[in-house]
Image: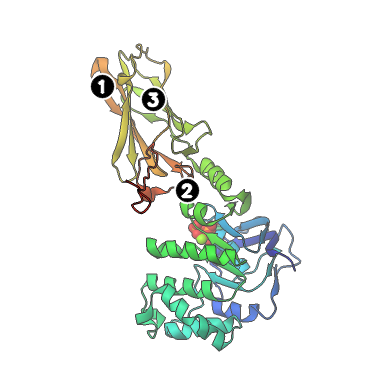
Amino acid sequence: MTDVAIRCEGLAKQYRIGERESYKALRDVITDAFASPFHRFRSALRHSSNGAASKEEPYFWALDDVSFEIKSGEVVGIIGRNGAGKSTLLKILSRITEPTRGHADVWGRIGSLLEVGTGFHPELTGRDNIFLNGAILGMRRAEVARKFDQIVAFAEVEKFIDTPVKRYSSGMYVRLAFAVAAHMETEILLVDEVLAVGDAQFQKKCFEKFRQISTGGRAIVFVSHNMSAMRTVCQKGIVLDRGKVTEHGEINKVADRYLENMQPDLLSNEAETASFIVEEIYIGSEEGSVIKTFDDVKIRVKAKAKTDIVDPGLYVGLLSRDNQRITALDLKDFQTVPGITSGDSFELGFDISALPILPGSYELEVFLKDLGHHKIELVPGRVGFDVVESPVYGGRKIDSWYGQVGLRACGFAKVTSLINSDQ
Ligand SMILES: Nc1ncnc2c1ncn2[C@@H]1O[C@H](COP(=O)(O)OP(=O)(O)OP(=O)(O)O)[C@@H](O)[C@H]1O
Ligand SMILES: [Mg+2]
């Protein structure tokens, strides 16, 4: 017995730019994929070399030399920007498409929920699709019947179970598809993004299900852009960047590094106001651009004066992504800055101790001022930053559900027992 569930070696997938490969339906590939519990999905072009495409041909590598191993019972998040190759990887693992080079070994049956389809037949009812999927996975009718009620209850589609699934709303469809994939007896579960279709309550239920599944020894590979969800449900993360694996390890470390690299150059182009050229706006903690709640944080604005500035000033507002001003700082309240001569560079900012902002995405708005000339100039373009999810209060991770402001608090409890009281 091996505890390896998935092993990819030198996996590569080449596509022709602008041309979509047509896929087989998922149910067709599943049917012929599960004759034996071990599968090696290797390149169809075994003789092709690195130079499979001549230079003139508009090919590119959607996956490029991808190697990794996933063990049974691991929940692994695949992280990466749009077009990084995440869905391509899951399609290869579920045999919807073949790699151009390399191979993927998979030990066990695969249940999957992919963007290309669910293995459902649109004309069949929910009930028939559940039995069809079970049959495709090699389960006996009685076995599926035993799971049936759990699946329907989990998906919350009792009323519509005898309606053809083509009449389902996208949320109902995904709920049933997830319930089927999660309850069938497969050793591996692949889930691509789709949970985003469900409401928050259903997503929570799915993540709880992930936990049960992995405790039962099954491996889960989960693609999502929701970094908080990743941190909550995955133990490990793999970052794909333009088809290559750039990180693989403990999920929080991987997610921190990913977010750090994702941080845009805060102002990629110089921004200009009437009196200033702004070269850089920076917000970061001692660990760089990754900020956690209650970290000490530095804000710096580097700029050059276009004219003489008599009484320089800086105002920085901290806004939520829905434009609510959470708090703001004005340098005037802390100190006076000496005058700046035209052409001189300068740096203004704030050192904030223990930033009490909960995990989430925020923006800075910045005004530079010359109060001597009654100028208050908004720097165009806001600067986005994230406060990453962390165990704010020392225990479990806190997410944006808790709002935007962190509190320095202690718990209090007092229990007075009447029975044992002598008074
Ligand atoms: N069937 C296809 N034919 C041609 N090119 C494709 C095909 N499928 C994907 N691509 C291209 O391969 C690259 C990787 O796509 P993929 O769908 O794997 O990205 P992704 O990481 O899942 O992105 P997203 O976050 O947007 O879902 C993209 O440039 C995409 O346009
Ligand atoms: Mg995708």
Question: Residue at image x 54%, y 41%?
Answer: 261
Whether disc 1's CB lies below 8 Å from ligand 1 is answered no
Sooner in the amino-acid sequence: mark 3 or mark 2: 3
Marks 3 and 2: CB-CB under 8 Å? Answer: no
Task: State which quadrant residue 282 falls in.
Answer: top left
Label 3: how many Cα within 10 Å (few below 14, some 14–19, many 20+): some
Q: Where is residue 377? Give x, y as percent.
A: 29, 27
Return the mark for residue 397.
2
Amino acid type assigned to the residue bearing label 2 in the image: Lys
Amino acid type assigned to the residue bearing label 1 in the image: Lys
- Between the residue at mark 2 and the residue at mark 1, the CA separation in whole angstroms equals 44 Å
Return the mark for residue 277.
3
Give left or right: position of 258 versus 367: right
Question: Residue at image x 59%, y 80%?
Answer: 137
Q: Where is residue 66? Give x, y as percent.
A: 67, 56
Answer yes or no: is residue 339 visible.
Answer: yes
Q: Does residue 354 sit above or below 394 in this rendering?
A: above
Question: Residue at image x 46%, y 86%?
Answer: 128
Q: Does residue 366 sit above or below 422 in this rendering?
A: above
Q: Does residue 244 sit above or below 101 in this rendering?
A: above
Mark 1 = which residue? 375
Sooner in the amino-acid sequence: mark 1 or mark 3: 3
